[in-house]
Image (cartoon, grey):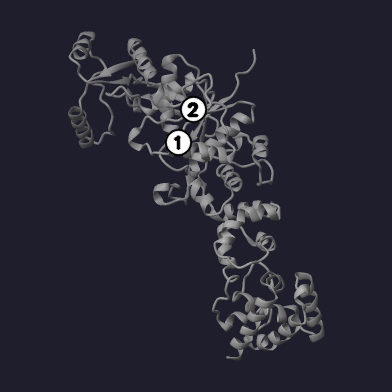
Amino acid sequence: MSEKKVRTRFAPSPTGYMHVGNLRTALYAYLCAKSQDGVFVLRIEDTDQERYVEGAVDIIYNTLRETGLVWDEGPDIGGGYGPYIQSQRMGLFKQYAEQLVREGKAYYCFCDKDRLEEMRLVQKASGQAPHYDGHCRSLSAEEIKAKLDAGTPYVIRQKMPREGVTSFEDLVYGHIEVENATLDDQILLKTDGMPTYNFANVVDDHLMGITHVIRGSEYLSSTPKYNLLYEAFGWELPVYIHCPPVMKDAQNKLSKRNGDASYQDLVAKGYLTEAVLNYILLLGWSPKGEEEIFSLPEMIKAFDPAGISKSPAIFDPEKLRYINGAYLRAMTPEGFLEKALPYIDSVVNRDCDKLFLARLLQKRTEVLSDIPEQIDFIDALPDYELELYTSKKMKTTPDTAREALPHIVQCLEDIAPEDWNEEVIHARLFAKIESLGVKNGWLLWPLRVALSGKQFTPGGGVELAALLGREESLARLKKGMEKLQG
């Protein structure tokens, strides 16, 4: 008999932007399926209408497509297990809940809000954890029929075992046991006929043939309840893979509510989609070797759920910057320019060789949003302090700059406009350095500062002179000389 085909699902609620933790769940579910030649299913869980956000379904579709996590079955493409939108599956949940009632594994509960509130107050006063007291669990058939005939509102609750333990194996957290006495008789169907999240989840996962359930560790405590439902129906349990939480720091979970970055925020800040996905892969999962940079096809080859950690994953912005920088440096200059152009154009309006500028920026940029600050001197020389001419490393001061700038001007004025390029500028300046018998920095540091009004720029003085052109470079150098003369 052949092994059952692996089927995983990503089942988000359309409540807004794609959180980093949510995207990680989608990635792990996708990789778990694809690494075993399985099927990745997208299901939209939209039954909580109070939290529904207009346009959020499109955000889910767009994010998954942008990141390459393309589903094999889903709302827009169909498949053999649809519909794939939970609100379109409403008719089937009631029949499954009522099946459990008929089999004595669930029951009608007619308790109204007042009784439940009074029960909770009594439990609180006596130091008990809030739980349903089982008041309707043993109603007679006559009592139930009378209440149903009278149209008394009801919920359907699962009849939990009162003794023994429920245990399960998790691929990440190992063997987990829960005392059944601690489990509440959970509601399966609400008074309005809508299923609860837990119930709909189990029924949908079974009906869609999901073999591996990948989700956050916050669902570990609910898993015994899920399993008791599977057992009540006589259904095969899925393989569970619970992932550690993504934390902002040791105490706080990453949360959009607290202003933490969503996938959309990170892309807007200038992070590449591929780099974000690569970083999210490493949030709680470790590869076997030293390599940390993975394309999506490489992730599929390398992924093994055994590499998922139990420990919370701390979101490290510096690590994300490092990975993003590695992706930027690996691009062709033309590819980098295409990504960088909106950031360049936001501050550069003068005519210049933008591919040349992109080559300078590419070596020194980790995040695209770093670009404007690096090049905001190109359109106009900013006002700057003379102290910028001081560099301990280059052994320069405003006094040495006062001496160096006339040499630079004389050297560059001798270059004809048609010969003005990086190679010629470099050759002339280094010939001057040799003839003066000075260190490179003695001449090149004041050149950089005079041209940019900055100590740190995408390129050195030679590249900046080539970029700005002969006329602008000489004008800035002469302005620097005047500034130094005071």
Q: Hey, what amino acid is under mark 2? A: Pro
Q: Which residue is mark 1?
A: 57
- The answer to whether residue 140 is above or below residue 37 is above
Q: Is residue 445 left or right of residue 91?
A: right
Q: Which residue is mark 2?
A: 75
- The answer to whether residue 382 is above or below residue 137 is below
Circle 2 Cα neighbour tier, 10 Å, few/some/many (<14 / 14–19 / ≥20): some
- The answer to whether residue 143 is visible is yes
Circle 1 Cα neighbour tier, 10 Å, few/some/many (<14 / 14–19 / ≥20): some
Q: Which quadrant is home to the N terminus?
A: top right
Which sits in the foreground, 25 or 407? 407
Residue 9 in the image: x percent, y percent? 52, 29
Which sits in the foreground, 438 or 341? 341
Q: CA distance from mark 1 to mark 2?
A: 10 Å
Which secondary structure lies at badge 2?
Answer: loop
Q: Is residue 365 left or right of residue 211?
A: right
Q: Hey, what amino acid is under mark 1? A: Val
- The answer to whether residue 30 is above or below residue 137 is below
Which sits in the foreground, 410 or 286? 410
Cβ atoms at labels 1 and 2 below 8 Å apart: yes
- The answer to whether residue 227 is visible is no
Q: Is residue 88 left or right of residue 320?
A: left
The residue furthest bottom is: 485
The circle on residue 205 is none
How many numbered marks have been drawn onto this rendered protein structure? Answer: 2
Q: Residue at x 21, y 23 (%)?
A: 111
Q: Which quadrant is home to the C terminus?
A: bottom right
Which secondary structure lies at badge 1?
Answer: helix
